[in-house]
Image (tube, grey):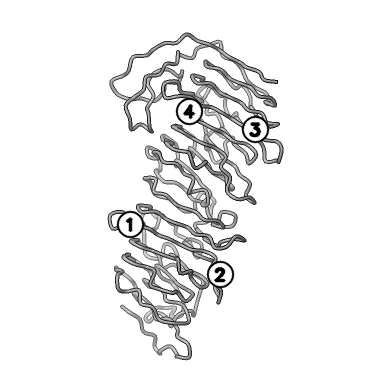
Amino acid sequence: MKRTLRFVPSLLLVAACSSPSPATPDGGGVVENDAGADAPVVSKCAPATGPAIEHHSTIQADETWGPGLHVMTFGVAIRKNATLTIAPCAVVRVKKDYELSVGSGNVGDGGKLVAEGRADEPIVFEAADADPWADILVMSQGSAKLAYVTLRGGGGNYARRGASLHLFGDQYAPMQALASVDHVTVENSGKYGVYLESRGAFSPDSHDLVIRGTNGMPMSVSAPASQSIPSGSYSGNKIDAIRLSGGGYDDYHEDGVIHDRGVPYMVGGDGNFGELSVVGGPAGPATLTIEAGVKLEFPKSDRNSGLWVDRSTGDRPAGGILKVLGTAEKPVTFTSSEATPRPGDWVGIVFGAIPNAANKIDHARVEYAGGDTGTRGFSCGTPGSDDVISNEAGIAILGQPTSAFVTNSVIANSAKNGIERAWLGTTIDFMATNTFENIAFCKQTANRTPNVACPTPPVCDR
């Protein structure tokens, strides 16, 4: 059974303002186009005034909320594979701490939200009073399609991580594209604007997402979902950085990409481990590609803050591949997230097992690393160190590489070494194209070679 709830106001053409501004709370006014980059578009929506249509129950059959004013006086859930369609020029006001949830985590109990406004006929979700509402939650069996939508004043007490839009996937399944966004703005959210959890992600066609005015960061993202972060604008928040959570289910078991979205990525924090691990899975090795211009910040931590390309050691092919594709103009930066960074704040980049020949680090800067890796005795040692046999560096390689895959890069401010050549096998030189600045001990250590004893005391390139 399909129900249509429709409030039809007369159209009111609003004169264009001299400068662009976001949609007004009642849906009228001037809206920005293309994430604020293009000329303003005049809204054709009439001011959304009462009487408002109230919503307070679960939706189990297809339903449409027409243009005009709506108010959610209780939480609304879309279930039983129903679709809720919200028309252009609709303004949905939500009471304190209530949520619009889409689908569930149970197979067969899905739901769909379709809110497709237009540049001149936007859709607005906002608080019904002075208190924040919760969020739009899309579960693993749900989906959402949002276009020219503003989510304003959400992320209240009952929103997960204080986010206005929460995509909550199935952590045991491959990546799930739960929502498509097109010219969507999230503003004045509680702690985050968007939270991508447990392999919940945006669809590949998503673009022009704007997050501004949050009381924290624009996004908190499960690391494997980072590749789904759309183009857009993520500045104008209390902290202009995207938080990545890694470790465990948030390891890279599949291929992933970290795009340059104009703000740094902060790894860990807020209860998450400060690590990224590329470990592969049943389908084979996983490749993490980091694009030019990306900046990754790691917190100060003992053994748990760094980037691992396969966590294990041993005489077997690594399950992870790392491709760092910086350029001279836009290098990729790996650094500390501390307000006052110091050498050894974080571990660095560690390659376990036998590195894949496809690994590539080009035009990168690795700084303030060299913290404790928890590995010892893999190289010929670090002369002058208080722990000669420990294996710490900006980049540590624990298995025999096929080539000097680190090129045109800078390793700076390491608490121990620049490159730790911690393998048994053929010697490969990493000095030719790389620069080493303020390295405490060795620019590169000496690797062990078969049937040849390491010198005593150890030697290295300084």
Q: Residue at x 32, y 26 (%)?
A: 39
- Mark 2 surroundings: few (<14), some (14-19) or many (≥20) residues within 10 A: some
Q: Position of residue 124 (x, y in %)?
A: 49, 24
Up the image or down, 42 lies above or below 318; here it is above
Q: Earlier in the sequence, mark 2 or mark 3?
A: 3
Q: Name the residue beneath numbered marker 2.
A: 312
Disc 4 marks which residue? 149
Q: Name the image quarter holding the C terminus.
A: bottom left
Q: Residue at (57%, 58%) from the top-left corner?
A: 253
**Quadrant hosting residue 333:** bottom left
Residue 203 picture location, percent across and down:
52, 41
Task: Measure how far apart labels 1 and 3 are at the Cα level.
Answer: 43 Å
Residue at 47% x, 76% y is 400
- What number is the disc on residue 331? 1
Q: Is residue 441 visible?
A: no
First in sequence: mark 1 or mark 4? 4
Q: What numbered label is drawn on residue 438?
A: none
Q: Which residue is mark 3?
A: 111
- Helix, strand or loop at label 4? It is strand
Does the CB distance between marks 2 and 3 fall below 8 Å? no
Q: Nearer the viewer, residue 103 or 385?
A: 103
